[in-house]
Amino acid sequence: MLADADSDGYAAATRPHNSSIKQRPARVAVVSRPEDIAPTLDEVAALARSSGTPLEIVPQATGHGAGAPVGKGAVLLDTSRLADVSIDPESRVAMVVAGATWSAVNAAAEQHGLLGLAGSAPSVSVSGYTFGGGIGWLVRRDGLASGALRAVHSVDGSGRSRTAADDATDEVDRAAMWAFRGAGGVGSLTR
């Protein structure tokens, strides 16, 4: 559901960790489950059609990377409630949803003697950090966090669920994997 500037959800979502940035989007969409993202994007599209104005979708979990103002031409997609983490100790793979933080990943990984390729701030979201390259303490030994990315499940601009991966059958999904590793957003992450 889209929240306007008078709601509590709007006020909470537009206070990013990086407080030097002003955020005054047209609306805020707070999602609580990954499956809520596609219907939320449909709602944003309907709002854009009814107003006759295109709206940019700006996903944000923690706001550590909030580097530019978010204005009236955007809808802030607040994914901070999407925080589930699961660890497969055999394959040494973490499955996280859009708002999971590195502190949550490393708390779960530690139970198996593992550690994620996090940076120095545990409250940073895994998605924002990884999609920005992921340069942390372990980069010299283990490489960038983005290089360890195996797959990204997302919803594209048409509302379709997609899975980006290096070995995806669709060339678009292979190219999307490259984009998710730091070239720019090509969809709204679900997990």
Image (spheres, rainbow, N blue to C red):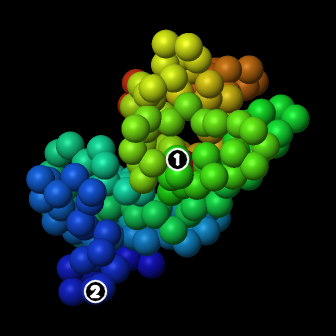
The answer for how far apart the CA atoms under marks 1 and 2 are is 29 Å
What secondary structure is marked by label 1?
A: helix
Work out whether residue 171 can be spotted.
Answer: yes
Above or below, comparing residue 103 to residue 43 in the picture: above
Tell me: 122 left or right of 111: left
Q: How crowded is mark 2: few (under 14 residues within 10 Å), some or many (20 or more)?
A: few
Tell me: 28 left or right of 26: right
Residue 9 falls in image quadrant: bottom left
Residue 133 falls in image quadrant: top left
Residue 51 placement (x, y as % from top left) = 24, 69
Tell me: 178 left or right of 96: left
Dot 1 or dot 2: first in sequence order is: 2
Above or below, comparing residue 105 to residue 51 in the picture: above
Residue 136 falls in image quadrant: top left
Looking at the image, which is closer to me, 18 or 164? 18
Residue 36 placement (x, y as % from top left) = 58, 68
Residue located 50% across and 36% down the image: 118
* Mark 2 residue type: Ser
* Mark 1 residue type: Trp
Q: How crowded is mark 1: few (under 14 residues within 10 Å), some or many (20 or more)?
A: many
Residue located 30% across and 75% down the image: 12
- Specify the label residue 102 is tagged with: 1
Looking at the image, which is closer to me, 95 or 34? 95
Looking at the image, which is closer to me, 31 or 62? 62
Looking at the image, which is closer to me, 6 or 19? 19
**Residue linked to disc 2:** 7
Residue located 56% across and 63% down the image: 82
Residue 101 placement (x, y as % from top left) = 51, 52
Above or below, comparing residue 168 to residue 78 in the picture: above
Above or below, comparing residue 163 to residue 30 in the picture: above
